[in-house]
Image: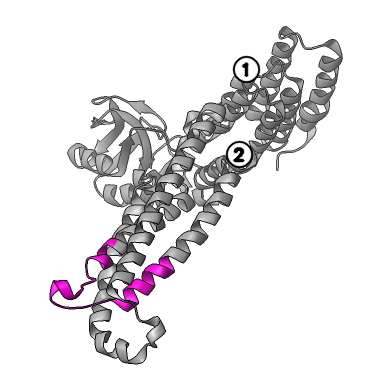
């Protein structure tokens, strides 16, 4: 269930949490009104006269609160859209998903809209003499006042929060956290239950994608349980892969029809990529931020340098941990799912190919890339370490082609000798 929730579109939609809070506001309003009906006569006896509310006064309070919070909700929504547009144009459109899934923004918007709905629900139960009976839900009206105070506090918090999240350091930290989470799930201790598995031989059928889009999530525990006693599946399209309707999603053996249902039930195809199980996408988000930071329109090499160094927080653990197996087995030890993860060399290429193309002309970014390469070479296996050295040589050659001064080139080569080639003599951890 946790796996599905992390990759579900509900988690990244702005309407889900506010929608839940609106429903909660309706239930709360109805519950408090029932309490008011039960306490009606007792309330009039217990409350001091200064706390009693008249019909017109109650209506005025509810109308004022409801109208105000709705206007504030519209303002906060406009501010959020402005921040999203700024971040998208400056650091990449894929960062919009981070703002959409921001729980703080969703809760603040939900509180404002929920308070408005609460006031409407209570307002309809305020009755005067012209209605044939006089009824003022005192507890419910005071509840609206409390919600109004909470909304004021939420507005102050929102202004602080939105000012914080637009800072590049916060954006980088959030994307880095997604990378670390994906690496930990697929390469860290959570992957210790994986077993070595060869490619599926003698597959009986291909499972075709039911729709076009990206593979976004695989419910591994559910798939393994459902496949027990039915067959084996090998993913042809792993998370992050784009498929068209009718293209192979997986190869299966055993009960072909049964395994087709199992795969379709436990492999999600969505419209956009997510970093939940897609390490390459998580890496690409940080690389894109670095590339955009050195573009002529932004010209912020120091941000690019910091982003490149943050990549180490995700990639070094992936290189340090022993390569997990490609299969998941059931309780009997029979492999039920085969899924090949990106190798260390592939992740290295993903980072340095783009840096070589777009950032080789900036010595500050190249130095950061050399520090990253040194960290990776220190902990990677022989094959990945060799790829790191190759990529570094290509990066320096690209820097020379970009017209980097001989003085800077000499310093970069010295850094390479110290950080990367020197790391080759260190045993991997």
The residue singled out by tag 2 in the image is 172
Q: What is the quadrant of the N terminus in the image?
A: bottom left
Quarter residue 351 falls in: top right
- Provide residue 316's location: percent of width, then percent of height: 65, 39
- Picture quadrant where residue 183 is located: top right
Give the main secondary structure of the magenta stretch: helix
Please tell me which residue is depicted at 70% across the width and 30% down the height of the picture: 305
The image shows residue 225, relative to residue 50, as above or below, that is above
Q: What residue would you read off at disc 1?
A: 358
Q: Identify the secondary structure beneath mark 1.
A: helix
Question: In this picture, which residue range is highlighted in magenta?
Answer: 120-147
**x then y, percent, for residue 265:** 25, 44
In this picture, residue 108 sits left or right of residue 204: right
- Of residues 141 and 206, which is closer to you in this image? 141
Of residue 151 and residue 417, the one placed in the foreground of this image is 151
Q: Quadrant of the C terminus?
A: top right
């Amino acid at each position: 269930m946790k796996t599905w929730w992390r990759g579900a579109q509900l988690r990244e939609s702005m309407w889900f949490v506010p929608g839940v809070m609106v429903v909660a506001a309706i239930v709360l309003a109805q519950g408090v009104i029932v309490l008011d009906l039960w306490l009606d006569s007792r309330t009039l006896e217990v409350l001091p006269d200064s706390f009693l509310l008249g019909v017109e006064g109650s209506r005025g309070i509810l109308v004022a609160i409801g109208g105000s919070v709705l206007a504030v909700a519209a303002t906060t929504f406009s501010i959020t859209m402005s921040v999203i547009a700024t971040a998208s144009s400056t650091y990449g459109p894929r960062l919009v998903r981070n703002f959409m899934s921001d729980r703080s923004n969703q809760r603040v918007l939900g509180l404002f809209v929920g308070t408005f709905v609460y006031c409407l629900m209570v307002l309809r139960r305020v009755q005067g003499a012209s209605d044939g009976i006089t009824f003022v839900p005192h507890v419910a009206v005071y509840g609206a006042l409390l919600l109004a105070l909470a909304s004021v506090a939420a507005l102050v918090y929102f202004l602080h929060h939105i000012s914080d999240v637009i800072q590049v350091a916060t954006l980088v930290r959030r994307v880095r956290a997604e990378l670390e989470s994906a690496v930990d799930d697929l390469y860290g201790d959570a992957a210790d239950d994986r077993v070595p598995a060869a490619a599926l031989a003698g597959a009986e059928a291909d499972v075709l994608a039911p729709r076009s889009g990206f593979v976004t999530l695989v419910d591994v525990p559910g798939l393994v349980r459902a496949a027990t006693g039915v067959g084996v599946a090998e993913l042809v399209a792993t998370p992050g892969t784009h498929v068209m309707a009718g293209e192979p999603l997986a190869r299966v053996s055993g009960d072909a029809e049964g395994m087709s249902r199992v795969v379709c039930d436990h492999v999600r195809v969505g419209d956009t990529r997510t970093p939940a199980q897609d390490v390459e996408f998580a890496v690409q988000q940080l690389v894109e931020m670095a590339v955009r930071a050195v573009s002529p329109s932004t010209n912020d090499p120091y941000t690019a340098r910091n982003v490149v160094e943050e990549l180490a927080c995700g990639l070094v653990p992936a290189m340090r941990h022993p390569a997990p197996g490609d299969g998941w087995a059931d309780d009997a030890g029979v492999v039920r799912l085969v899924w090949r993860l990106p190798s260390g060399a592939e992740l290295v290429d993903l980072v340095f190919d783009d840096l070589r193309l777009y950032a080789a002309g900036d010595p500050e970014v190249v130095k950061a890339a050399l520090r990253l390469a040194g960290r990776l070479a220190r902990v990677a296996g022989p094959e990945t370490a060799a790829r790191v050295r190759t990529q570094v040589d290509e990066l320096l050659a690209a820097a020379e082609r970009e017209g980097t001064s001989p003085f800077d080139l000499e310093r970069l080569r010295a850094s390479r000798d110290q950080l990367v080639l020197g790391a080759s003599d260190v045993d991997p951890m």
